[in-house]
Image (cartoon, helix red, strand yellow):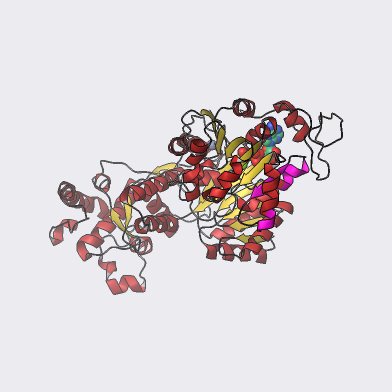
Amino acid sequence: EGFGAAGSGQSTSSATVAAPRRAVRTGPAPTALEALEKVFGYDSFRNQQAEIIDTVIAGGDALVLMPTGGGKSLCYQIPSLVRDGTGVVISPLIALMQDQVDALTAVGVRAGFLNSTQDPAQRREVEQAYLAGELDMLYLAPERLRVSATADLLDRGTIALFAIDEAHCVSQWGHDFRPDYLQLSMLHERWPTVPRIALTATATEVTHKEIASKLQLGEAKHFVSSFDRPNIQYRIESKNQPMQQLLSLIRTEHAGDAGIVYCLSRASVEKTADFLVENGITALPYHAGLDSRIRAANQSRFLREDGVVMVATIAFGMGIDKPDVRFVAHLDLPKSVEGYYQETGRAGRDGLPSTAWLAYGLQDVVQQRRMIQQSEGDDAFRRRLGANLDAMLALCETIECRRMQLLAYFGENSAPCGNCDTCLSPPEGVDGTIPAQKLLSTVVRLLRERNQRFGAGHIIDILVGKTTPRIAQQGHDQLKTFGIGADLTDQEWRGVVRQLLAQGLLQVTGEYGTFAVTELSASVLDGSRPVKLRKEPERTSRAAKKSKVASDLPAASVDLFEALRAWRSAEAKEQEVPAYIIFGDATLR
Ligand code: ADP
Ligand code: MG
Ligand code: ZN
């Protein structure tokens, strides 16, 4: 006995979470199951925990891919207790280290941490404990290892294992890259016999490989759990009045619930939090621009109080272990499916029904494409960002089960889930060829006839035939396509534009987010490529209006087709979208 609740001498299999105290480890080390029961108060292992723990206890390396809330921590905590020496945990979650250590101390595990928030005296105390063999676990911020004194310190004690938590931070392509993670390969070089376990909830094949190679985990056993989170209901809808949509989600389905609302910018975090507070919701902001004390205070209120809504940038959430987050809402489009999956995964760790809700609009797509074009880095980097965004858009615009698509992205096959918006109310797929042709011909005409490019708002004004001052000033009411799209609303047109962008039939160019056709557009205009669109669920009833000049289109398309064909053959020579359509006045009739 003699381990765990110090000196109690009683063997109870229930959670004996006594008042915080320092356990003095005297007798033999516990077995894995004893540690699970007596220290953590659980009666069985979950997922692949038992095999992972056995592997590490036996001195082997492990690479663990397990979804958020799956129970990764025990995979290194228990081996740290069972093996001789101290388990050293590398974690980027500096703000959570105190909490983690407190939680461990409360159950009798001797734990400490070293990071930049400590003063020298505090640091020394932890170092002494480590050297005296009085620590079961030591949490280290990755930048600590830059200091050679840290490695020397570790050498003077006994290391039970290295755990590299949030191992995807090593990925330069990922959403949480930490440069200090790159040097973690030194662990293997300097301590080749110490077992290492790397853990992440990020699951794509690419990241997986990158972790294995960057951390020199060539010999490691891989443990890949299913990434399905069946209790999370995935829903994606188009953005009209995002804050109102959010408010109605909270009021109708999640009144009094804890939740996280993600926004892209600090400004929109502030605005959204203010809006929610004005509407009687307990909401707090969190972003990197806030004073660190305010951030810490907000985070701790979110964790400790019931029913707090955290409005945050993606700076918030990694490693936060709050079991009863009932909803995660995105007011802006995430940059990748991986990011989306991570963020939504913070809902429902307790396994109870939870909502992942995303509102996204055309502006999101335009803005993100622009950000990619303007981003630093080489072409390969931009291509990768573009591919990430494309996958995210495909998820948004799918007419199939969201979960199937999400899991497929992580290489898992599954059947329709019955618990996502597309399963619950299957969207109608409609033939969108004619609207697509109308839109694309407007884009082509503007360039061809006026040598101009415009963004969505103006193009839609032309299509629906709205005489705005800008339309008048530009004389765009004289365009052949003016008013040919009056059968659809502005909102519906935005949906068409979004989906054409998602399908690669339209592209955003230039720093102002103006549109251009793509190589695929020609086949739409000539009718050889049918366009399938997702019909927006009807929110407000609206009398269908009749198209003004529907007959204008087919004739126009034929000539455009010629032009585009010419362009396609010229395309091999010229990269830029050229002043390609060189034909006379009559051709666009
Ligand atoms: P992850 O790091 O994978 O996101 P955590 O390690 O934080 O997940 O665990 C998530 C929650 O599940 C924690 O509250 C943890 O105590 C609980 N948990 C983990 N393993 C078990 C288990 N075998 N039985 C019961 N609860 C568990
Ligand atoms: Mg974790
Ligand atoms: Zn589904």
Location of residue 466 with respect to 568 vertically, above or below = below
Q: Which residue is at the front of the view, 500 or 16?
A: 16
Q: Is residue 7 visible?
A: yes
Give the residue drawn at x 50%, y 39%: 402
Q: Where residue 228 sits in the image (x, y, percent)?
A: 56, 34
Q: Is residue 71 visible?
A: no
Which span is picked out in magenta?
102-122
Q: In this rendering, would 71 be left or right of 561?
A: right
Q: Which residue is at the front of the view, 325 or 45?
A: 45
Ligand 1 resides in the quarter of the picture at top right
Q: Where residue 553 sits in the image (x, y, percent)?
A: 26, 53
Give the residue drawn at x 43%, y 58%: 363
Quarter holding the C terminus is bottom left
Q: Is residue 497 magenta?
A: no
Q: In this rendering, would 200 be left or right of 361?
A: right
Location of residue 397 with respect to 222 vertically, above or below = below
Q: In this rendering, would 375 be left or right of 64?
A: left
Q: Which residue is at the front of the view, 393 or 118?
A: 118
Q: Which residue is at the front of the view, 54 or 542?
A: 54
Which of the 4 image quarters holds residue 431? top left
Location of residue 36 with respect to 268 vertically, above or below = above
Give the residue drawn at x 67%, y 31%: 84
Which of the 4 image quarters holds residue 86? top right
Q: Where residue 268 sits in the image (x, y, percent)?
A: 54, 63
